[in-house]
Amino acid sequence: MKALATFLRREIEVIGAGRTDAGVHATLMVAHFDFEGDTLDVELVADKLNRLLPPDISVYQVRRVKSDAHARFDATARTYKYYITTSKNPFNRQYRCRIHGNLDFKRMNEAAQELFGYSDFTSFSKLHTDVKTNICRITMAEWTQVDEVTWVFTIRADRFLRNMVRAIVGTLLEVGRGKMTVQDFKQVIELQDRGKAGTSAPGQALFLVNVEYPENLFID
């Protein structure tokens, strides 16, 4: 991060908690860096970085962690939200996926609950990636209504595969449109074939909203 290197006046390697698909947003992202020298005032670091960073990036908080802490490998859970809307709105087109026609959200939630019974999500993973396993543990998956025209899908898991959330959302939309049954959705998972799942939903409506860590990882 150039801002951090500028503030500390030395080259600094910054390790993020992960990466997101192109066009995906993050209302919260975690990263770590190693620093040898005088103890840093974490509040001062956050303030200085926010003065140096561009308008679309801000630092919420800086905390000290154990010397072997890792932003990616020590994360215990991540949460994403995907927003869809049935109304055209020029002011949120970069942050919502507009849906035409009616959706059966009750049926979509029934299908989403089936995710808890599986751990191999090859059917929702981008092909030809370098990951060693497609095993994930999903602990939350639910559609909720935000207002008259907006719904949000919240999903939490210990890890996510590339394109996984967008592929799940795209397949659940097929259930909502009546093009796929709940049983069909289960079969998609069991077949472990990306070609059987629905088209990935657009990236602009997806947000990484939380990354969780064991509390004993932090020093202060």
Image (cartoon, rainbow, N blue to C red):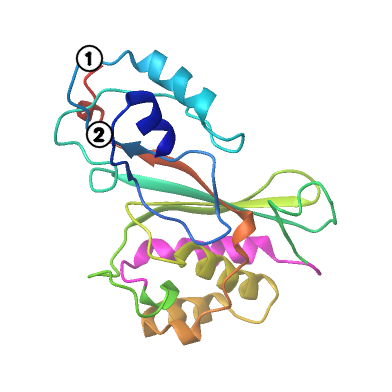
Magenta range = 100-121
| Residue at 32 percent of width and 58 percent of height | 137
| Residue at 14 percent of width and 36 percent of height | 68
Label drawn at residue 39: 1
Give the x, y percent position of residue 92: 76, 48
Q: Quadrant of the C terminus?
A: top left
Circle 2 sits on which residue?
214
Compare residues 49 and 90 and report the one nearer the observer.
49
In the rendered view, would you say 180 is above or below 168? below
Q: Is residue 43 found left or right of 141 in the rendered image? A: left
In the rendered view, would you say 36 is above or below 150? above
Assess whether residue 115 is covered by the magenta stretch: yes
Q: Secondary structure at mark 2?
A: loop
Count of numbered circles in the view: 2
Q: Amino acid at mark 2?
A: Pro
Q: Secondary structure at mark 1?
A: loop
In the rendered view, would you say 175 is above or below 64? below
Q: Quadrant of the N terminus?
A: top left
In the rendered view, would you say 58 is above or below 189? above
Compare residues 108 and 11 and report the one nearer the observer.
11
Q: Amino acid at mark 1?
A: Thr
Give the x, y percent position of residue 12: 29, 37
Query: Considering only order in the chain, which callout, 2 or 1, is on the residue closer to the N terminus?
Result: 1
| Residue at 22 percent of width and 33 percent of height | 34
